[in-house]
Amino acid sequence: SGTTRPMRILHYVQRSAKCGDVLSVISAIDSFCSKVEWAMNVGDKKGEILDAVVLETRPRYVLELGTYCGYSTMRIARLLPPGARLITIEMNSHYAQVAKELFQHAGLDAQDKSAEKRPAGPTCKVELLLGSSSVLIPQLKKKLDIDKFDLVFIDHWKVSYLPDTRLLEECGLLKSGSVLLADNVTCPGAPDYLEYVRNSPRYRSQYFPSQLEYLQVEDGVEKSVFLG
Ligand SMILES: O=C(NCCCCc1cc2cnccc2s1)c1cc(-c2ccc(F)cc2)cc(O)c1O
Ligand SMILES: [Mg+2]
């Protein structure tokens, strides 16, 4: 019962990244995961595609499905203007705890929305929700007073990409122009999701070829604009 991989990432960051410097936290995670131990962060190569889509979309409301250690959460949050809100959903309470501690090290203004004691209203940019996406997505409007998302970064169970996208549509959480960006559509792959967004008249979809994080394996992200 030693340490877990997320804990080893956290300890490396706490030892080697500058407090309050989100870029040094991001690059510390990348150097640990490329030199010491692989982990399922979106990584630096696909991360640059994510950055470009965030900058191009200039989103005010962002949803992330699958926090893990919060690497992509931090990549997104650092590019958001004040007043923007980033909701990230994680299923695993240990991953969520590590992510929170990494956000603290990075000086990111983050809040655990699953905690009871919290000030009313969105006092911070990153709001971490603990639970399953299929349960939480239908609660977002009521719980967080959010109407539509401008950008959704999908990076959780690959079999959940399609059902959760359908759920986002049904819950009225997407508007014309909303952007979905899905990680791992080649490896591990999300074939039913790809088939849907590439063939549905309600999406304009584009594939960005890249590589699986920290490896020379083909992967890519799919950007799909909801047309309403
Ligand atoms: O599984 C992956 N990510 C999901 C894990 C989080 C599960 C959750 C479910 C859930 C439900 N509701 C709310 C929140 C959540 S979080 C994943 C896996 C690989 C990979 C692994 C082995 C391999 F050989 C090659 C690639 C690479 C990646 O980039 C990944 O993202
Ligand atoms: Mg991924």
Image (cartoon, helix red, strand yellow):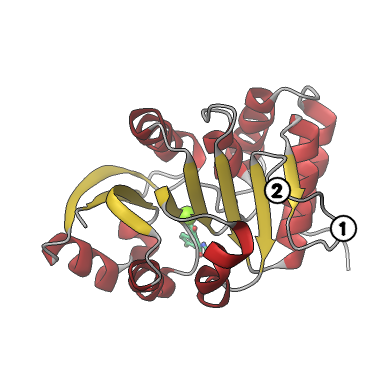
Mark seen at residue 4: none
Q: Quadrant of residue 71?
A: top right
Cβ at disc 2 under 8 Å from ligand 1: no
Q: Is residue 214 visible?
A: no
Query: Going by the image, does 86 lie left or right of 44?
Result: right
**Which corner quadrant holds the N terminus?**
bottom right
**Which corner quadrant holds the C terminus?**
bottom left
Residue type at mark 2?
A: Gly
Q: Is residue 63 visible?
A: yes
Q: Secondary structure at mark 1?
A: loop
Q: Nearer the viewer, residue 158 or 128?
A: 128
Query: Going by the image, does 96 lie left or right of 207?
Result: right
Q: Nearer the viewer, residue 192 or 78?
A: 78
Disc 2 marks which residue? 121
Q: Position of residue 130 (x, y in %)?
A: 69, 66
> Label 2, label 1: how many angstroms apart (C-alpha)?
12 Å
* Vertical position of residue 106 compared to residue 217: above or below: above
Query: Going by the image, does 68 lie left or right of 166?
Result: right
Q: Quadrant of residue 86?
A: top right
Identify the residue at horizontal 80%, vertical 45% (top origin).
Answer: 101
Identify the residue at horizontal 35%, vertical 73% (top origin).
Answer: 170
Q: Position of residue 164 (x, y in %)?
A: 41, 71
Mark seen at residue 117: 1
Q: Position of residue 189 (x, y in %)?
A: 34, 64
Identify the residue at horizontal 48%, vertical 69% (top origin).
Answer: 157
Identify the residue at horizontal 33%, vertical 72% (top origin).
Answer: 166
Q: Nearer the viewer, residue 121 or 161?
A: 121
Residue type at mark 1?
A: Lys
